[in-house]
Amino acid sequence: MKFSDKQWDFLKNVSQLIDFIDMIGWKATGGDLYRSPEAQDLKHKQGLSRARAGESRHQDKLAIDLNLWDQNGVYIPSLELAEEELKDKLAIVANYWRELHPKNHWGGDWDFFDPYHFERAL
């Protein structure tokens, strides 16, 4: 499979995820899809990512960060929830994402908690 085919399959899953978010009455806006090596290293230096340049799926255009609002119009990061509470709140979206493809991963499952990150493994 060509790399562009992997990117295309990933974006189709992102489209399905966005449709699902809309169907459950939530809203999403896009964050990072592509990150340059310099931007990735800056995120790493700021402690916002464990990945360094060359290690992030964002550089492969196989990851996206989504800003999410719930069915009440509340911007989810504004809720001061503990990590487990946030995982519970986002479970419906995370589970749907994982079900779309066996290589889809959610950043909320990692030791480095990144609950707005959705990616496709190589």
Image: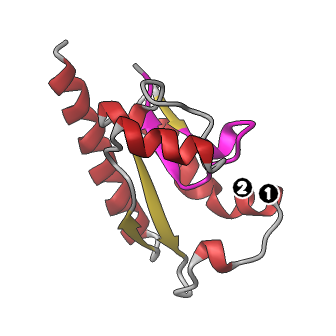
Q: Is residue 100 above or below residue 113?
A: above
Left or right of residue 8, residue 41 in this image: right
Quadrant where the C terminus sits is: top left
Where is residue 81 shown, x and y percent of the image?
A: 79, 70
Q: Residues within 10 Å of mark 2 (few under 14, many from 20)?
A: some
Q: Secondary structure at mark 2?
A: helix
Q: Residue at x 35, y 60 (%)?
A: 18
Of 40 and 108, which appears nearest the observer?
A: 40
For badge 2, the amino acid type reads: Lys
Residue annotated with mark 1: 83
Of 70 and 55, which appears nearest the observer?
A: 55
Residue annotated with mark 2: 87
Can residue 121 be seen by looking at this rendering? yes
Left or right of residue 115, residue 83 in this image: right
Q: Residue at x 24, y 32 (%)?
A: 7
How far apart marks 1 and 2 lie (CA) works out to 6 Å
* Residue 88 is covered by the magenta coloring: no
Q: Residue at x 75, y 36 (%)?
A: 111
Quadrant where the N terminus sits is: top left
Give the magenta range. Answer: 106-121
Q: Which mark is residue 25?
A: none
Q: Residues within 10 Å of mark 1 (few under 14, many from 20)?
A: few
Can residue 63 be seen by looking at this rendering? no
Where is residue 119 shown, x and y percent of the image?
A: 44, 37
